[in-house]
Image (cartoon, rainbow, N blue to C red):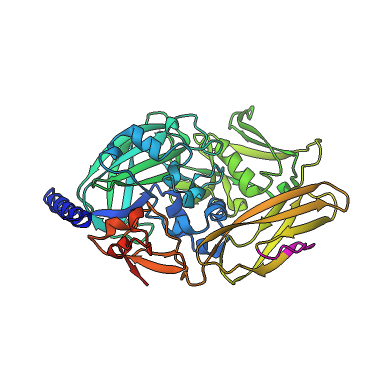
Amino acid sequence: MNHLQRYANALIKWMLAAAFIGPALVFAHGAVDIPIAKQVHCKTLPDFWSGSPSDAGCAAVDAKSGPYPGQQWNEVAKLIAAPGYNDPDIVKREVPDGQLCSAADSKKDGLNLVLPYWYRIDVTPVNGMMDVRIIGTAPHVPSFAKVYLTKPGFNPAASPLTWNDLVLLHTEQLTVAQTNWGNEPPAISASGFFKFKVPVPAGQVGPATLFVQWQRIDPAGEGFYNCSDINLVDAAIPGAFFDLGQFIEPIMDTLKAGDSVHFRILDNTPAAKEAVDITLPITTANLDPKIWGAQLANQINPSIARVGEKQGNNIVFNSTNPRANSVFALAKGYSKAMAIIPGGGPAPTPTAQITGPTRLIAGQTYTFHGKLNNAQNTPQYTWAPVVDTTVVNQADVTGTAPRIVQPTNYTVRLNARDGNTGPTYQATYAITVEPANSGGYPPYQPGTAYQAGDKVSHNGSNYECKPWPATGWCSLPAYEPGHANGNWVNAWNKL
């Protein structure tokens, strides 16, 4: 009996055994949508595929990883073969610190970015419990979920997420999926869901990150890892909100790098004491109101006030249009004040910047735009684009992507001088060029948890993963599509 037959027989025996565990409808692909995971939120945006999403956090994901994390919203996954997925040390090794939100997938690394303006939803525990829901798209067999929460004091806007930042709140065994959505339809079309209660540490309030490991119980050990950004609200706080007015008023348009924003909330006593008093320094890095507005809002004690737009019983921060947000106090008679503290420091350091496509098809015409931020004089530009290395002295450069037979990474380089005699600043910009016949399919990556019907491009050809029972081989390097050993024909169909 050859290796292929032994593997197929073992897989069939395991599937038959699993079928008798219970009448479970469980899912091979899925994600957390309550509270909504990062990639699920981005996927739901109407303009996520535009290349410039309106949501600041999703725009940062797109700039880092393109639309792939949103496209693969239900496959933020890592294979850890049984029984390793039950060993915390092995899981921490395979999904290391700083890569938790992407399940250590470099193609989804944008989900690990440390940002102040990730979409964040209010969560108000009821009797010390909160709801967690996992939605799924493909039927399979039993699984379990481990739910973690960041420790009090962790600042998700300042530090990458590590295992040491997390506390395990709950483990849920999942055997029967639900299909009656009631009045809570899925954030993205799905065939069923798991929903369960999770205890929340008493007294913990404010910004936090919920981290969920959803693990299939099977030999391959595919596990899904999701990060949801939340704002924990004290259930004892009354539900009434008192609108104090617009958060960022027009006067703040004169804000510049080197200044500081002084924000206060005054209480309802005759002395009008300061219940909130925050001074936020402004630099070139956070001059955009989408950034400093979110940084400031995250520092406000949610038991005193919240910043955002009212949506039902929640206040949700609008990261797309920060000027649409208002300040809502939880006590009547409060007032707010925001002012600019002028800065007297040196002028901010110029920085070179490149914008343009991150993915190109061989032979496609491209345009990259250069900019020297905070320039004191008229900038002078010198480009080294993808193919045409002729000196180009203008802000925009246009060319044609090279003809290649397999996906290839390139670096675009820009030298920007501040005036004719000033210092020169350099920017680099990474892009990927795919073969013209790739059909737009992602490049093949060995070890990826491919599923039946997944299509990839490899060495100038396109392939589709075969249905069960061959599906499990698609992720194995020995079945690399098109390889000379010929094994690939057992796992892939050439398109």
Judge whether 208 appears above or below 382 on screen: above
| Residue found 72% across the figure and 65% down from its top | 397
The extreme left residue here reads 20
Q: Which residues are magenta?
A: 387-396
> Does residue 127 appear anywhere in the picture?
no
Based on the picture, tell me whether residue 18 belongs to the magenta stretch: no
On-image quarter of the C terminus: bottom left
Judge whether 114 appears above or below 419 on screen: above
> Does residue 477 appear anywhere in the picture?
yes
Please provide percent x and percent y for residue 128: 33, 34
Which of the two residues, 243 or 77, is positioned nearer the viewer here? Answer: 77
Which of the two residues, 489 or 320, is positioned nearer the viewer here? Answer: 489
Please provide percent x and percent y for residue 171: 28, 37
| Residue found 76% across the figure and 48% down from its top | 425
User: Image check: 257 left or right of 465?
Assistant: right
Please provide percent x and percent y for residue 343: 78, 37
On-image quarter of the N terminus: bottom left
| Residue found 77% across the figure and 62% down from its top | 391
User: Image check: 122 left or right of 398?
Assistant: left
Which of the two residues, 250 or 211, is positioned nearer the viewer here? Answer: 211
The extreme right residue here reads 421
The extreme front residue here reads 485
Please provide percent x and percent y for residue 210: 41, 40
Which of the two residues, 272 or 347, is positioned nearer the viewer here? Answer: 347
| Residue found 35% across the figure and 37% down from its top | 91
Magenta stretch: dominant secondary structure: loop
User: Image check: 266 left or right of 384?
Assistant: left
- In terms of image quadrants, where is residue 381? bottom right
